Amino acid sequence: MTTGPAPGPEGFDAGAEADELPSVAPQLRDLRRRAGLTLEAAAARARLSPAHLSRLETGRRQPSLPLLLGLARTYGTTVSELLGETPAVADPIVRAGGPGAREADGWTYWQAGGSGRGMQALRVHVPHGRSQGELVRVHPGEEWLYVLKGRLRLHLGEAEHLLEPGDSAHFDSLTPHRIGAATQSGADLLFVHTLLQSSLAGLCLGGGAGAPAHH
């Protein structure tokens, strides 16, 4: 009885599936270097051995489709980019009369950046005394905010900060955090956060459909 080729170690399939994929070696090397990662650090994030990642980067091995998905998550990119496909050029300009305001539990959001990017940029109105200000968030990524109007209360871990207009904050999202308005009229801010290993469907405030996450 003849059997098909056995899957190799660490996600490598020696069968036709791998043969049908274009070489990802140049993209893998470039993405790792752009991320500032050593071979050992990148392999640890992707749950591979350094030797196996080296073989992928030199083209001596081709990854299976499941491994491609894992590598794309590791480098914060898409399978299309790993395969060297050129995405359609997105419009870099978001006009003032663009997407309208969206509301979730009193918080109001305006899109301030393009879709399909590694970051989400928003203009946000935080009302005073609404329950969402008491929700503590912890998740992978980074966040940056800039206060436009009003005063903002920012809790980072055990510390509390009062931000005035013109103040900004940049922090690791794995730090437990929450924000709230410290003025009766609320606070307005610009807000940017990364979408590391998060699906757009999961980025909802209080579970409301179509509302970006926050915090």
Image (cartoon, rainbow, N blue to C red):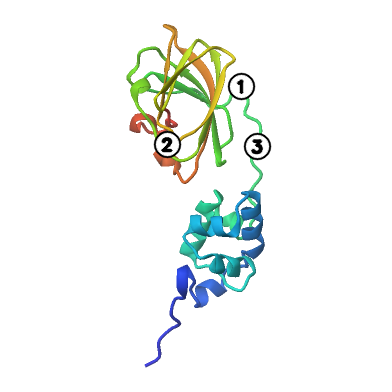
Mark in the foreground, 1 or 2: 2
Q: Which residue is mark 2?
A: 203
Residue 22 picture quarter: bottom right
Q: Which residue is mark 3?
A: 91
Sequence-wise, the earlier of marks 1 and 2 is: 1
Tag 1–tag 2 contact (CB < 8 Å): no
Separation of residues labelled 1 and 3 (CA atoms): 14 Å
Q: Which residue is mark 1?
A: 96
Q: Amino acid at mark 1?
A: Ala
Q: Amino acid at mark 3?
A: Asp
The image position of residue 153, as x and y in percent, is 44, 16
Quarter of the N terminus within the rendering: bottom left
Residue 80 picture quarter: bottom right
Position of residue 16 relative to residue 151, above or below, is below
As drawn, the label of residue 164 is none
Outermost bottom residue: 1
The image position of residue 171, as x and y in percent, is 51, 31
